[in-house]
Image (cartoon, rainbow, N blue to C red):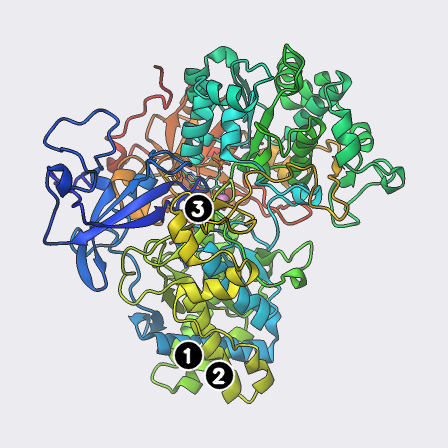
Amino acid sequence: MAYKRQIDRLPIIPADATEHNAVCHYCIVGCGYKAYTWPINRQGGTAPDQNKFGVDLSEQQFQDTEAWYSPSMYNIVQQDGRDVHLVVKPDVDCVVNSGLASVRGARMAENHPSAITGTQQHRLTDPLVWRYGSYQPTSWDDAYDLVARVTSRIIVENGEDDLIVSMFDHGGSGGGYENTWGTGKLYFESMKVKNVRIHNRPAYNSEVHATRDMGIGELNNAYEDAGLADTLVAWGCNPLECQTNYFLNHWVPNLQGITQSRKEELMPDEAHPPARVIFVDPRRTVSVNAAEQAAGPENVLHLPINSGTDLALANAIFTHIVDQGWHDTDFIESHTLREAEDRPPLFPARGAADGRPGHLSSFEDAIDANRMSLDEAAEICGVPAEDIRTAAEWIAQPKEEGSRRRTMIGYEKGIIWGNDNYRTNGALVNISLATSNIGQMGGGCVRMGGHQEGYVRPDESHVGRPAAYVDQLLINGEGGVHHIWDCNQYRTTLNAAEFKRVWNRRTNMVKDAMDAAAGGTREELVDAIVGAIQEGGLFAVNVEIIHNEMGKQAHVVLPSAQQGEMNLTSMNGERRMRLAEKYMDPPGNAKPDCLIAAGIAQNMERVLREMGFDAYADQFTGYDWQTEEDAFIDGYQSRHPDVTYDRLRVMGTNGFQEPPQGVDDAGHIIGTERLYSDGTFSTDDGRARFMAGPWRGQVTPGKAVEMGTYPFFINNGRSNLNWQSWFLDQENDFVLDRWPYPFIEMHPDDMAAKGVTAGDVVEVFNDNGATQAMAYPTDTAKPGETFMLFGSPRGTQGNIVGPGVNELVIPVYKQTWADIRKISDTPMVARGISFKSKEYAV
Ligand SMILES: Nc1nc2c(c(=O)[nH]1)N[C@H]1C(S)=C(S)[C@@H](COP(=O)(O)OP(=O)(O)OC[C@H]3O[C@@H](n4cnc5c(=O)[nH]c(N)nc54)[C@H](O)[C@@H]3O)O[C@H]1N2
Ligand SMILES: Nc1nc2c(c(=O)[nH]1)N[C@H]1C(S)=C(S)[C@@H](COP(=O)(O)OP(=O)(O)OC[C@H]3O[C@@H](n4cnc5c(=O)[nH]c(N)nc54)[C@H](O)[C@@H]3O)O[C@H]1N2
Ligand code: SF4
Ligand SMILES: [Mo]
């Protein structure tokens, strides 16, 4: 907010300011914050008893003082209808971030709407209905009634399969246990909706089926393990930019040797050599650079593999480890599947017949099937065999005094949205299992994560496996009503160009029908809408915090509250559950998502009864929640009675690590530091499974041809500054002045060959569609390989991602090939931008 907002002084937080527990809702790390609010007409003073910090602020403070906050952490917002000062600052006592903020979390306060300071004025305040050719604000009752009447008609006349739902399944804002329960109860209990997709993928499935099938939940360690490991592996993730304070507060201290004393205290009988880190990523990320600065380049190994060849690499590392005898035979014997008769016949008889694109098996079977030499892998992956050998040594070679090496593998979208996702995920777990690195200090084979988690829903097994490929259903003209919660498929789905064309066409049919019925009765309007649906139209309801592109094609838009504007529980990447308390009012008439779900259910009950379907109407009862806490009690708390808002409030920003194990004498919930520490895994017999899943090339339909046709690899993902589809960034000068367009990192020689200079706008195109980006010269980029920022309003990377998915309908965003042409000299808005290297040296 200091940025371009002419603020030269900020109020001191008074000693009696109200303190609320807050958790950053942007990424999985879930950093602890404190929100302070106090009346607008007061501020604290410099004397220790006049300010919240209890220090003498008339004196110069030391460099790392806590008695400070940045302008972006300040705003003036409404609380119970009154203007109050708000400061949201990182909590030094939270074990997750120890007082660190990030360039995203530090903007939480300025990312709330304020009529006084003018921030985020695009937030939705009222329900909107398409009426008289534009969007008209209206009451909740009016909007709910239209949603309920159209939805009820369609499920009664066409069946529930014609109701298509796109909905979040995460924690943080949008999700959280309250909201996943509200939506889950509506669609999976009151109805049995099958054509449903999650916010980030075109089906209702797991991103990481493989690890779960092997008996290993994907968030199995504690953040402290990253500080205790001998070797850290970042596989297909960019932790400095995407899991920022996990990296800075837990990885970097280990790489700098700061956690040495902690290692000696917890593991006195072992050697603790300097920590090492391996990165597997086609490009050199700023995380590699930061790790080199922290640990010295000799302790950092970057394997810049060819995109989508991770499975070959992982299988070669697994093979080398086993051939050297570095696996843990006792552990394998005692804790993994042994019975020979359970072993399926060898590949190629294995297939996807049981719904799995890889086989769950024994150690012997897996090594037999997956065997890959260092040289073969070097050829496929495009990295030296020597480096693969080094990686295997760093992962598993016993330490000098003979003790086992402790290795933590963290992976994310580089493999999750990558070629042969299921097998690759399994291949990483194979390495950790063989070296008994799961459930151990300094170990873990974990997702680095995206959002926080907050999943509690009724049984969803009716969705089936593989789940329906929902985007394709919509493209093929199926479905009649589409409810969308907290996702912007226009910017974030695959095959997005085609998706948008069809969605526009189908929703316009309904808009036309509504325009033609203007002035008629509600019955006539609903008849007109249903008529357009039966002709192939689509009626869309968008539950959102802003009026995004999908909202601008929808027919009813319902305004939601964000975290901070409601009470919300979530867990982070080490399963740490906290209650983020409400510290301000939602804008206008916006409501928590769970209460919106309840409102839709109550109106459907009423309408179905009116229509004479009493039994059906009865399915929509049980939503008499007044607050989000009522939804929490109905959902999460009914499964875990010890976990209450009151207890969580007391436990502050440290909360507890799920699953809960009871309550201690002080009334604190007892948590679980790491999973599987007793060697019992999440399978019927408690034994983990290995995976037999050999390398089989680029398997996603369409990708091999695309790779052969186009000259550039269009790798894509995130930057530190931007959060997801830029839904709050797009109204923020601080972000837009840096990235008015999404950047595309290109090697200078490739730019020269295309006649492009820094800041020029290029079109990126292939058979799937076209998009645009701003060229950013990057010396470390491999020639022919680019990296484009995803999710931007000024260039959707998903436009050029093909429709191909893996057997379980996991999208493959990362593997995209296209051509590039210049379309504009550097536009005015991009003329002031720096094109320096993003790397740094200390
Ligand atoms: N090319 C490419 N595509 C990708 C990816 C990639 O790496 N490359 N990554 C994928 C991944 S991992 C993800 S998670 C997705 C992200 O894709 P999305 O989930 O579609 O994007 P978001 O920006 O997180 O959120 C979508 C919408 O939710 C709204 N919203 C925010 N808070 C709330 C709330 O409290 N309630 C409600 N109702 N709405 C809210 C925002 O305004 C925004 O419009 O993109 C996926 N797509
Ligand atoms: N700043 C910021 N942080 C975020 C988010 C955000 O929007 N902004 N979003 C959050 C969410 S929802 C998610 S899911 C996470 C994602 O977190 P990450 O997965 O860490 O981030 P990405 O940039 O999507 O992709 C990671 C890396 O995958 C690499 N990659 C591409 N292809 C391959 C391949 O074939 N093999 C390998 N090994 N690597 C490959 C890319 O070069 C990239 O550096 O970030 C979370 N954190
Ligand atoms: S690292 Fe993630 S959770 Fe922490 S402040 Fe940054 S965005 Fe928020
Ligand atoms: Mo994500």
Quote the CA–CA distance across marks 1 and 3. Answer: 40 Å
- Relative image position of residue 327 (x, y in whole percent): 73, 23
Checking the image for residue 145, the label placed there is: 1
In this rendering, the label closer to the viewer, 1 or 3: 3
* Amino acid type, label 1: Asp
Q: Residue at x 39, y 69 (%)?
A: 556
Q: Are marks 2 and 1 in contact (CB under 8 Å)?
A: yes
Vertical placement of residue 30 versus 225, above or below: below
Quadrant of the picture in which ligand 3 is shown? top left
| Pick the front one: 192 or 760 | 192
Q: Secondary structure at mark 3?
A: loop
Q: Earlier in the sequence, mark 2 or mark 3?
A: 2
Residue 577 visible in this rendered orientation of the protein: yes
Q: Helix or strand or loop: what does disc 1 sit on?
A: helix
Pointer 2 residue: 607
Give the number of the mark in front: 2 or 3: 3
For disc 2, the neighbor class at 10 Å (few under 14, some 14 to 19, many from 20) is many
Q: Residue at x 49, y 51 (%)?
A: 170
